[in-house]
Image (cartoon, coloured by chain):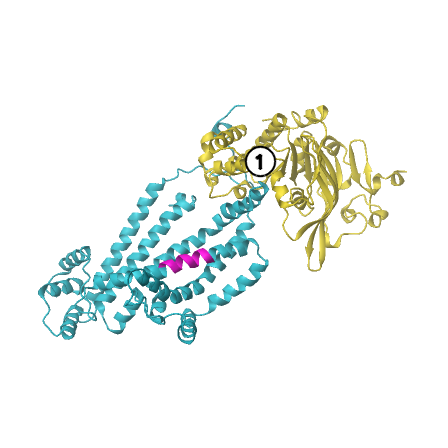
């Protein structure tokens, strides 16, 4: 396995554009999520807006507490109280040309019908994501038979074996319990499970943090290969920017509940526009360049209950100017990316 | 697409510090070898219980068998037949034989279910006395243990699933309160209110001695209702609290989240994913409670004068009927062992993970 998966997949992919029919699979606008408590709410995601193309891989990166996990549970409508979506819309566009469906106001019955067939999820720890007292095959069969009425046990078994084969797991493993499999195998099994009902979008929450680096690369290469074959879109949430730079088509950087920069992986790596993105990039060793001194980002993420005025990043920003502490930065569109930074506005540059 | 075998696809992974090490595949012992080992353990424990039952009367000061024979002759007012003497000496000690011979004779007695003769109900054999009480206890305590478990566990799943909801706000504090009230007090209060004041239910006994056929069974239900209700009332709260707390933690598990994300029906998510896992500790408790069925209802049977094993034991204690006591103790020890064996065996089936630990 080569050091850089992106060289073979993502960058080539960028040049070709997303596979399949062009168009948007998910359209998220002004999504705001609060944790409602007795003394008001804490806004963990604010005005999150992005579009996801069919077959596209979008990476979402940020430090702990930046609102990544909150965003994922809101997108998949899996949030539990006290988390509440207070504003915005998540419009899912089915592939058959039916009109888009806003997931936010959707009732639980309609939502259940969309789940797994339109959008599935891979959780961080495969150890905990599989039911420990059910055989692997049964955990495939129940979702297959829930969504495909009339599918009998034998057909579900055939499909399970086919899915396991896609991620290189032998057929006899369907009879195994999760504890009888290795960590990497379990994670690949949950990825196969996510593809069971041919979803158009797979949301992955830190899919490789629980496995070692060798397995990480194998798994991500497998995901990209399956994406090419089956054409589903992927949202990967992780704190590992270097992983995203390798596998994602586009990357969104989250800070204090906002997307502060979004753009192609290429652009974010070569010409990050936001000082925070630069800081994140320089916290990782470069992939091909000779070793240089790594720079971390000083300070810690802000307390969401007491956000700094103006740009939330200004207390940690190495290039902040005086206006940053008072003026909220607007979203500035650049050719390959968009970022929320005052220094990018025409007034600042002139 | 190519179906590569899993082992070929997985490159040998070095143990990297800071990452979860991939677990190696253990050779899982088969279900049967596990069960055989468990069975061996319980046979040994049963042997120990029987042997202890044999040794205890012989270690007592004086000679229990002589005392029992004298007592029997006093209550019966006649010379005992020689086979009764032999039986009593086999069970409680024979000064003329050595310990090993006595042990063999004792085991022979047990093999014939000969537990001696009751003193208080002379000349009824102990085995007959015990087996007259056994069905009553099994029916009363057995059925109420199952009912309390099903009711408490079911409500525990509901309250735990919607923790903080209305049902939880009412049932959970109520269960805590009920569990804290001593059982004998509940039983006495129920007896006083429903038995004496309102006269809805009979206040003592297990059946109407004059009834026959269907009427007899109906009377058994009527006589058993009050003792059964008090047992269920006092026991279900404990099951509810245990199951509720386990459900609350299980609901936060990722596999329950994933089950919801899969779009499974809520009933399936609750039963197959949440409750199925949350039940494992309660299940062990339930199996042990079944083991305690024989000896566990002492208070109920005393308060309601119910003709079961507990009442027999109480009766035997007050009348110093050692043969009956010995018989009941042996029965209790063996049923606890059998219940443990059943619990262990069934647990292997409900939780596949224990097979590895053996």
Taking depth in this image into account, of A169 and A296 the one nearest to the observer is A169
Chain A colour as displayed: yellow
Element on which disc 1 rests: helix
Specify whether residue B311 is painted magenta.
no
Q: Is residue A225 above or below residue B211?
A: above
**Which residue is disc 1 drawn over?**
A194
Taking depth in this image into account, of A106 and A286 the one nearest to the observer is A106
Q: Which chain is cyan?
A: B
In the displayed structure image, the side of residue B45 where residue B119 appears, left or right: left
Q: If the image is split into quadrants, where does the N terminus of chain B sit?
A: top right
On the image, the x and y values in percent for residue B330 come to 26, 60
In the displayed structure image, the side of residue B95 where residue A17 appears, left or right: right
Q: If the image is split into quadrants, where does the C terminus of chain B sit?
A: top left
On what subunit does the disc labeled 1 rest? Answer: A
Q: Residue at horizontal 32%, vertical 68%?
A: B306
| Magenta-colored segment: predominant secondary structure | helix
Q: Which span is picked out in magenta?
A: B142-151
Q: Quadrant of residue B124?
A: bottom left
Kindly tell me whether residue A285 is visible in this rendering.
no
Taking depth in this image into account, of A97 and B82 the one nearest to the observer is A97
Q: Is residue B24 above or below residue B209?
A: above
On the image, the x and y values in percent for residue A137 come to 48, 36
In the displayed structure image, the side of residue A245 where residue B344 appears, left or right: left
Disc 1 packing (10 Å; few <14; some 14–19; many ≥20):
many
């Amino acid at each position: 396995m080569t050091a850089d998966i992106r060289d073979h997949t993502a960058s080539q992919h960028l040049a070709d554009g997303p596979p399949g029919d062009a168009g948007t699979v998910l359209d998220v606008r002004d999504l705001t999520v609060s944790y409602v408590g007795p003394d008001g709410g804490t806004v963990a995601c604010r005005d999150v807006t992005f579009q996801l193309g069919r077959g596209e891989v979008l990476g979402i990166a940020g430090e702990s507490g930046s609102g990544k996990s909150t965003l994922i549970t809101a997108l998949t409508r899996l949030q539990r109280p006290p988390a509440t979506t207070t504003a915005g819309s998540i419009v899912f566009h089915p592939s058959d040309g039916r009109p888009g469906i806003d997931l936010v106001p959707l009732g639980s019955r309609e939502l259940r019908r969309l789940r797994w067939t339109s959008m599935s999820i891979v959780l961080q720890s495969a150890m905990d994501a599989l039911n420990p007292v059910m055989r692997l095959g049964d955990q495939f069969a129940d979702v297959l038979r829930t969504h495909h009425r009339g599918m009998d046990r034998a057909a579900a078994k055939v499909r399970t074996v086919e899915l396991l084969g896609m991620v290189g797991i032998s057929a006899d493993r369907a009879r195994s319990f999760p504890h009888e499999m290795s960590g990497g195998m379990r994670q690949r099994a949950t990825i196969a499970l996510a593809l069971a009902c041919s979803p158009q979008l797979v949301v992955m929450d830190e899919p490789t943090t629980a496995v070692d680096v060798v397995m990480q690369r194998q798994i991500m290469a497998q995901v990209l290969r399956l994406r090419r074959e089956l054409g589903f879109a992927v949202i990967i949430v992780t704190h590992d920017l270097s992983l995203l730079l390798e596998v994602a088509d586009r990357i969104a950087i989250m800070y204090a509940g906002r997307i502060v920069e979004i753009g192609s992986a290429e652009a974010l790596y070569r010409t990050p526009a936001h000082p925070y993105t630069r800081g994140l990039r320089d916290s990782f060793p470069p992939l091909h360049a000779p070793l240089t001194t790594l720079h971390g980002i000083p300070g810690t993420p802000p307390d969401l209950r007491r956000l700094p005025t103006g740009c939330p990043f200004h207390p940690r920003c190495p290039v902040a100017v005086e206006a940053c502490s008072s003026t909220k930065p607007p979203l500035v569109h650049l050719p390959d990316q968009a970022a929320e930074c005052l220094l990018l506005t025409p007034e600042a540059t002139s | 697409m190519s179906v590569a075998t899993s082992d070929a696809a997985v490159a040998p992974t070095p143990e990297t510090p800071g990452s979860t090490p991939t677990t190696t595949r253990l050779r899982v012992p088969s279900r049967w070898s596990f069960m055989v080992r468990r069975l061996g353990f319980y046979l040994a424990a049963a042997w120990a219980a029987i042997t202890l039952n044999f040794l205890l009367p012989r270690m007592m000061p004086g000679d229990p068998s002589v005392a029992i024979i004298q007592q029997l002759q006093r209550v019966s007012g006649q010379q005992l037949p020689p086979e009764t003497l032999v039986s009593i000496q086999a069970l409680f000690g024979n000064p003329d034989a050595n310990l090993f011979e006595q042990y063999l004779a004792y085991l022979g007695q047990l093999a014939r279910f000969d537990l001696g003769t009751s003193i208080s109900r002379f000349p009824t054999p102990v085995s007959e006395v015990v087996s007259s009480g056994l069905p009553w206890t099994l029916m009363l305590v057995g059925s109420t243990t199952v009912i309390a478990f099903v009711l408490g566990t079911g409500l525990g799943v509901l309250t735990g699933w919607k923790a903080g909801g209305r049902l939880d706000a009412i049932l959970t504090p109520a269960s805590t309160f009920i569990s804290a009230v001593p059982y004998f007090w509940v039983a006495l209060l129920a007896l006083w209110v429903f038995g004496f004041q309102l006269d809805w239910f009979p206040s003592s006994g297990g059946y109407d001695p004059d009834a026959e056929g269907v009427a007899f069974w109906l009377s058994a239900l009527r006589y058993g209702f009050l003792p059964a209700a008090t047992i269920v009332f006092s026991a279900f709260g404990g099951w509810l609290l245990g199951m509720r707390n386990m459900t609350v933690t299980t609901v936060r598990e990722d596999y329950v989240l994933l089950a919801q994300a899969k779009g499974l029906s809520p009933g399936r998510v609750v039963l197959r994913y949440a409750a199925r896992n949350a039940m494992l500790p309660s299940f062990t408790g339930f199996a042990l409670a079944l083991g305690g069925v024989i000896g566990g209802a002492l208070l109920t049977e005393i308060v309601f004068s119910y003709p079961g094993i507990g009442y027999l034991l109480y009766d035997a204690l007050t009348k110093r009927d050692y043969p009956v006591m010995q018989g009941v103790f042996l029965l209790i020890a063996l049923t606890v062992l059998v219940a443990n064996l059943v619990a262990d065996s069934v647990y292997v089936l409900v939780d596949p993970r224990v097979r590895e630990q053996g």
